[in-house]
Amino acid sequence: MTDVVSLLAQIEDTGRDPRGPGYLRPGFSRVERELRDWFVAEAESRGLDVEVDQNGITWAWATPPGADAVVTGSHLDSVPGGGEFDGPLGVASALAAIDELRDSGRLARARRPLAIAVFPEEEGSRFGLSCLGSRLLTGAVGPKRALGLTDDRGDTFAEVLADHGLDPARVGRDEERLGRIGSFLELHVEQGVGLIDTDQPVAIGSSILGHGRWNVRFEGQGNHAGTTPMTRRADPVVAAARIVGDIPTIVSRFDGAVATVGRTRVHPGGTNVIASAVDLWLDIRHPDDEVVQDVLEEIAARARDRASGAGYRNQEVSLTVDQESYSPTTHFHGELTRRLSSLLPQAPLQSTGAGHDAGILAAHVPSAMLFVRNPTGVSHAPEEACEDDDARAGVRALADALAMELGVEEPAGEEAGAGGTEAGGPEVEGRR
């Protein structure tokens, strides 16, 4: 059996961000392909049957494929400058959990099929739409829209798929494969501070907060930086900068809401050029979907004001706001969550503001999540962390949970849930 810590050590140098600390592992990139090759090699070394489906999802079957399968897994891509564990911890833990099930003899007694799924472009850092693989699988995004998505280089998703040996004409909802999934369980590093002040290494996911992404575009008049008076400019950068500065004040009026501009693009981007356009990507999250919409409307109204105040006479700055994605608040499968709480009675229930493939699948199949403690509380950044002993506790919890779903009556080990907080007590909230 290969320890989960050793598995992660094998890929710790893959995809390090050349610009600074952290990792750069975009979806459908050379680096992600290297990581997938690593996963395939590890899966095949265990005798797992590996296949890649029409949407680029990699499946590794620990048993013969079949209906009512128990599926676990996560993703391998990262945000720019991301941490080491976001995604890969779930994939490596799935491999280690299968080792533990096999070594304890429980896999041989499985009453249901078991597979690992590795989803592509979960972060949406390349094509702007998070959980792209699981959205395609479930039909949450249609083929036409997905194939037309472009990256920063202008390459379409259709072109990139073809470069990866996949047929763009075949992408989309996969009824047969989706129908095989009887339950889905995703393990992920915690992306908040929910477990920092507890003695628990593992939490059970209860829900994912509603969240959406919007493209906010200001368009003005490009011009010469040296010959255009300050009083005769229609500068979209001015309008964009002002609304970014307004957002913290606007959002502070909505309890529990968060909004972020983490990505911008200035066109054409010359130092001595007044820009003609600026794109901002806005991320808004809150447990109440109506509040998310209220926050968006207030930000959009203020952005219109900022646009109208950044022009000169007939040289105006215009504004467009386009939704790129939206996922309503998702509550994980009640019965599956209750079974996990019974199995791991000391593991607290925890909501999260971070999106996951499990949240997309939850609308179609019984789904649940396990979170492994992050001692820094930082995620989507190089400081993201996971202690070795906590990672191992996560594997034990995952193996026991899979055994429960596979119909193995006696889960091995009780250490994963050891600690103080009873399930069903106050819920701990985590947020990326």
Image (spheres, rainbow, N blue to C red):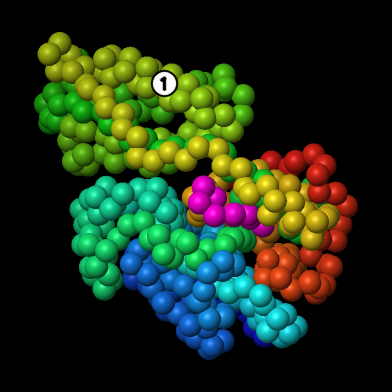
Residue at figure coordinates x 68%, y 47% from the top left: 334
Say which of 30 and 408 sits in front: 408
Q: Is residue 402 above or below residue 10?
A: above
Q: Nearer the viewer, residue 234 or 333?
A: 333
In the image, 235: left or right of 365?
Answer: left
- What residue is drawn where x is 74% and y is 57%? 340
Quadrant of residue 268 within the rendered picture: top left
What amino acid is at disc 1? Answer: Glu
Image position, residue 62 (x, y; %): 57, 80
Asked if residue 125 lies in the magenta stretch, the reply is no
Residue 73 in percent (x, y) is at 55, 66
Q: Residues within 10 Å of mark 1 (few under 14, many from 20)?
A: few
**Image coordinates for residue 131, horizontal then vertical, percent:** 43, 53
- Residue at 14% x, 18% y: name it: 315
Res 4 seen here: no
Residue 189 vertical position relative to residue 389 in the rendered view, above or below: above
Q: Which residue is mark 1?
A: 297
Q: Please state if 114 lies on the left or on the right of 33 as rendered.
A: right
Q: Which residues are magenta?
A: 362-371
Q: Quadrant of residue 20?
A: bottom left
Q: Judge by depth and name the residue closer to the eye, 136 or 28.
A: 136
Q: Which quadrant is home to the C terminus?
A: top right
Say if residue 406 shows up in the picture: yes
Under circle 1, the secondary element is helix
Q: Residue furthest top?
A: 313
Q: Where residue 35 sits in the image (x, y, percent)?
A: 44, 73
Question: In the image, what residue occupies the spot 50% across and 37% down?
Answer: 328
